[in-house]
Amino acid sequence: MHSSPFFLRLNGKPVILLGDGEAAAAKRRLLERGGAVIVGEENTEARLAMVAIDDEAEAVAATERLKARGLLVNAVDRPALCDFTTPAIIDRDTVLLAMGTGGASAGLAKALRQRFEALLPPTLGELADALFAARDAIKAKWPEADARRRAIDAALQPGGALDPLVAHDKDAVARWLKNPDMPQQSGQFTIVLRSDDPDDLTIREARLLGSADRVFYDADVPRAILDRIRADALVLPIVDKDTQPAARDEVVITLLAKS
């Protein structure tokens, strides 16, 4: 690896930020989002610094001064001068995903973030919190570490009771503890196609179609998409979009064609 990834707790910690303009403003937003206290170069307690100065000579000089003091420095758009780089971030509250290229291409990191962000449900952080809150109950149910690990792995696998790429309600972990062998959560889902190409389905959408019990589809949904539905699912055309049967202990999908 060209870099060692770490998550830093900066809440209440001083971080030096030098520079003006759009790049400095973006770094300021990032630092403030993490709770850092932004300070000037004169601060003697800071251990991290970010240099967002446009002028090359000024940026190099500032970076060298800060490094001479023992600080770790991020020099914006100058990867050769960086002790650390800032990744593209997906924030699902408790869950944080970071993608970096070592400064090679911020655009590539951003594109990856946008792709993966579409796959992750907004409730992912709540799932992490619920698992944390249930630690004692999980240990009580599976006292042996190996059995506990296998149970958690099974629940989090694709199609499992706690599949992280599927949205879950606040009681999902409690239901799983009562019935660890239950299949993926029941529920009713709507998938709106972005194109007629099945390769444009997200991983989450493909998994839902592969685990569905019933699918109601628009007449304009192409056969190539319908072929991705689980072979033994009940597949029916939509008659009335407003009166689809409610889901009962099964996964029911409404599949809408590209508008």
Image (cartoon, rainbow, N blue to C red):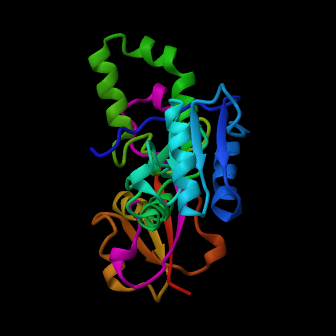
Instruction: Identify the residue at image location x=59%, y=59%.
Output: 246
Q: Quadrant of the C terminus?
A: bottom right
Q: Is residue 247 visible?
A: no
Spot occupied by residue 51 in the image (x, y as percentages of width and height): 59, 50
Residue 93 sits in which quadrant?
top right
Q: Is residue 21 magenta?
A: no
Magenta span of residues = 175-203
Q: Is residue 201 magenta?
A: yes
Instruction: Identify the residue at image location x=40%, y=37%.
Output: 182
Is residue 238 shown left or right of residue 30? left
Q: Quadrant of the N terminus?
A: top left
**In this rendering, is residue 215 above or below 124?**
below
Spot occupied by residue 99 in the image (x, y as percentages of width and height): 43, 52
Spot occupied by residue 170 in the image (x, y as percentages of width and height): 62, 37
Spot occupied by residue 47 in the image (x, y as percentages of width and height): 57, 30
Nearer-the-camera pick, 202 or 26 = 26
Instruction: Identify the residue at image location x=46%, y=89%.
Output: 220
Is residue 117 shown left or right of residue 37? left
Nearer-the-camera pick, 163 or 190 = 163
Q: Is residue 130 visible?
A: yes
**In this rendering, is residue 216 above or below 113?**
below
Nearer-the-camera pick, 210 or 245 = 210
